[in-house]
Amino acid sequence: MENSTYFYFMVFENLGYLRYALFIFGVIVYCAIILFNVFIILTIFLERTLHQPMYILISCLSVNSVFGTAGFFPRVLTDLLSDIHLISREACFFQSFVIFTYAANEYTILMLMAFDRFAAICKPLQYHNIITPKFLTILIVMNLSYPMILLGIAGLLTTKLTMCGNKLFKVYCHSYEIVKLSCENTIVNNVFGMFIVIVTCVIPLSFILYSYIKILIICQRSSSQFKGKAYQTCIPHIVVLLNFSFAFFSDVTLSRVVTLNLPVGLSVFLSLEFLIIPPILNPLVYALNLPDIRKKVIFLINRFK
């Protein structure tokens, strides 16, 4: 079938009554993600003492989680209750754009967090001159805009392709899986896709690693008190980074390495991990490990009661 106006999600076929259990589980997870992240956003927004670069970037991470999961959960929950698992080309391209913009933004925000910690720990006397509110705003806007522009261009390139198939063996619209359905030469799409991965993932990840190596070197030369404070603010970022990196690269590997022969359930879980685990784990990591956020969260919970 050439250039079908719909794509079909084949993974939902033959789920039987299991789909109802998966639906309930999905609703619980999605509600938890919204609740935890909105609470972090409100805590940082309402408390003036948290209007600092590090906490503002943490709130950006939560906003990005809400944004990314909004592109995934409503659609997949609808499909679990539906007997017809199809999606229009336009809606499919849009879902892919939202999900992979979320993934790219996660790395750019984590890169800004690493830069903030680098400036605070390695250049403490110049920190407030380096990370000014205006400069931070410019950095946030730039780092959230360029992945969106690149992925928008990639989406436009994909829409121009002639499709010789319409069956997606995913539970969401995956840009690379859509490209693989084309019967045209897709070398431009593949090269541009790798360019996006390098610019939005590899380069930010390299900068993050460089920043934390420099921080580690500084900490080794400093007092135990300074070292303790530095580790207290850096360890949550590192946990979030490792968690998201493992989840995202699991999805990339499953899409591009066709020789992997995994059970369907495990394959689906690994491809969805970056959309489920980081959004629910990130707010818990920051709320439990950063004393300033933890105190304000407890205060707000008591005030709501």
Image (cartoon, rainbow, N blue to C red):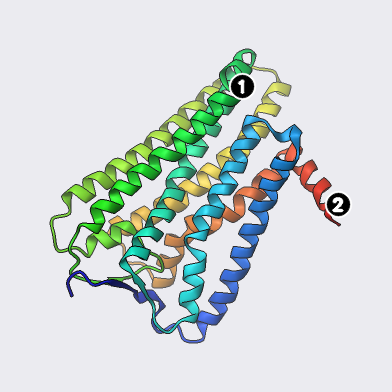
The percent position of residue 279, horizontal first and vertical second, equals 57, 53
Out of 83 and 282, give the one closest to the viewer.
83
In the image, residue 25 sits, relative to residue 45, either above or below, namely: below
Q: Is residue 262 above or below residue 284?
A: below
Mark 1: which secondary structure? helix
Kindly identify the amino acid type of the residue bearing the numbered disc 1: Ile
Q: Could you give the CA–CA distance between mark 1 and mark 2, rounded to whole angstroms?
A: 33 Å
Q: Residues within 10 Å of mark 2 (few under 14, many from 20)?
A: few
Q: Is residue 293 visible?
A: yes
From the top left corner, tell me how far across and down residue 213 is, in percent: 50, 26
On the image, the x and y values in percent for residue 93 come to: 34, 60
Question: Measuring 48% from the left and 55% from the top, which residue is drawn there?
Answer: 274
Quadrant (top left/top right/bottom left/bottom right) for the N terminus: bottom left
Q: Quadrant of residue 165?
A: bottom left
The residue pinned by badge 1 equals 121
**What residue lies at 40% left-to-right and 52% top-to-bottom?**
100
Residue 178 as seen in the image, left or right of residue 31: left
**Residue positioned 28% across, 47% down in the render:** 193
As helix, strand or loop, the secondary structure at mark 2 comes to helix
* 166 to the left or right of 270: left
Question: Compared to 57, does 130 lie above or below?
Answer: above
Where residue 18 appears, x then y in whole percent? 51, 82
Task: Indicate which disc residue 302 carries.
Answer: 2
